[in-house]
Amino acid sequence: MEFCSTLNFGTTTWQDCAFLGDFPPFSKELVCVSGLLVIIFFAFLWLSPWTRSHKEDQARSRAALRALLTIITPSCSLWPSRYTKFVKNSSSIHANDRIALPLDMVIQDVFEGVIEFRDPLIDLVELTSGIQINGWTICVYLEWKMWVDAMEIWLCHKVIAQADRGLGMFGWPTSRSLVDPFRLLFCPFVAGRSSGDHINLDCQPLSSIKSVEPGARLTLEFSSLSMGIRPCSVTHVLALLPFILCSRDSCGPLRRPRQLSRVLDMLGALSQATKQGNIVVRSATNMSMLYHQELLRLHERISEKGEFRKMLINAFGIRRWRQQRFCLALEAVLVRRGLIEKWAIEASVE
């Protein structure tokens, strides 16, 4: 069968095409109409609102990733698939150009080395409210797991405080060791090294106070939450975040925030319940500014000092190193904002 007598479509007629000549006249018209409909269909599909919307969504997703790249950078050249899927999800990119990421997912990806913050000292408090980047608002939100962990620490803190006041418990849960060697490396003493015992309740058990001998001087250091924080608020959860993260992978005692008034009550109850003598409090000083500077120094050391970094990674693993670097930066920002305070109590046993 010959298909066409010529390839000049301008002069070729339907009768010149052998394959059309085999059809009756009405079939030729049907083929022509069908071909025209196919062309119209594809033209409509190309120009349809759905196609334009799909192209706009792709451009919108690329713009969202570019905005996100100013805050978070992937460790490899490509974004992880869950982030590309996340920004394509209509529920994650809202109509007002707002990108909302789950905070716990972001933190765990930092620990695993999947992503990094461009500014390690990023203000997570500001990020929860939203940061404007190239017309986009980038923010993080707290998942229910973060709320549960925060409430657990808050409730345990109240229970332990009541036990401390009644001297019913001086230690920590027996399933954990008394000391975490890794945490001791990053548990700075910001008060002056005076003569006598120096106890940091952030990394040492409360039972350490029992070892103080009569006539000795005692310095207690501890972290506390600001009294201006409203309980069960977003700010409250963020202020507890360093304590949550430090306790998740630690083999030592759980780190809990303490209140100045309760520590003073505990010292008074201790002097009455033991035969060590009266514990006289000489001073209680807010050391938050010095603590902030010490946190920045430790963060620089763990990040920039190659030999120290190599020693930590070889001894404790790279994930623990990433976690500690993030926690130091996070706590430094929270101390600078006044959400976490550092207190030092000078006392003597008489």
Image: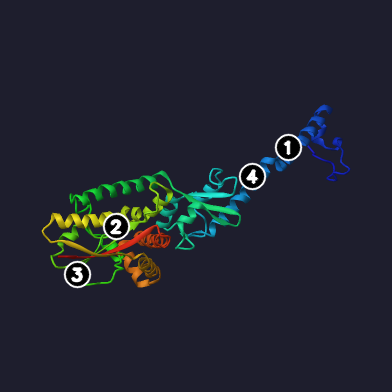
Callouts 1 and 3 close, C-beta under 8 Å: no
244 displayed left or right of 57: left
User: Going from the N terminus, do you reach mark 1 or mark 3 first?
Assistant: 1
Question: Counting residues from the N terminus, which is met first, the one under dot 3 or under dot 2?
Answer: 3
Taking 74 as reference, is 268 left or right? left
The disc label shown at residue 54, or none: 4
User: Nearer the N terminus, badge 1 or badge 4?
Assistant: 1
At mark 3, the secondary structure is loop
Q: Is mark 1 on a helix, strand or loop?
A: helix
The residue that appears at 36% across and 64% down in the rendered structure is 288
Query: In terms of sequence position, does the residue under pointer 4 or pointer 3 come before the other?
Result: 4
Query: Which residue was labeled with disc 2?
Result: 260
Mark 3 surroundings: few (<14), some (14-19) or many (≥20) residues within 10 A: some
Give the side of residue 246 with respect to residue 97, left or right: left
Residue at image mark 3: 196
Earlier residue among tags 2 and 4: 4
Observer able to see residue 253: no
Measured in 3D between alpha carbons, the distance from the residue under mark 4 to the one under mark 3, in whole angstroms, is: 71 Å
Task: Look at the picture and state if 164 lies above or below 307.
Answer: above
Label 3 with label 2: CB-CB less than 8 Å:
no
| Residue at 84 percent of width and 28 percent of height | 25
Dot 2: few (<14), some (14–19), or many (≥20) neighbours within 10 Å? some
The residue sitting at 38% across, 72% down in the picture is 305
Q: Which mark is residue 41?
A: 1
Task: Give the quarter of the figure containing the N terminus.
Answer: top right
Compared to residue 282, the image places residue 161 above or below, namely above
Does the CB distance between marks 2 and 4 fall below 8 Å? no
In the figure, residue 224 lies in which quadrant?
Answer: bottom left
Q: What amino acid is labelled 3 in the image?
A: Gly
The CA distance from mark 1 to mark 3 is 88 Å
Say what secondary structure mark 2 lies in. helix
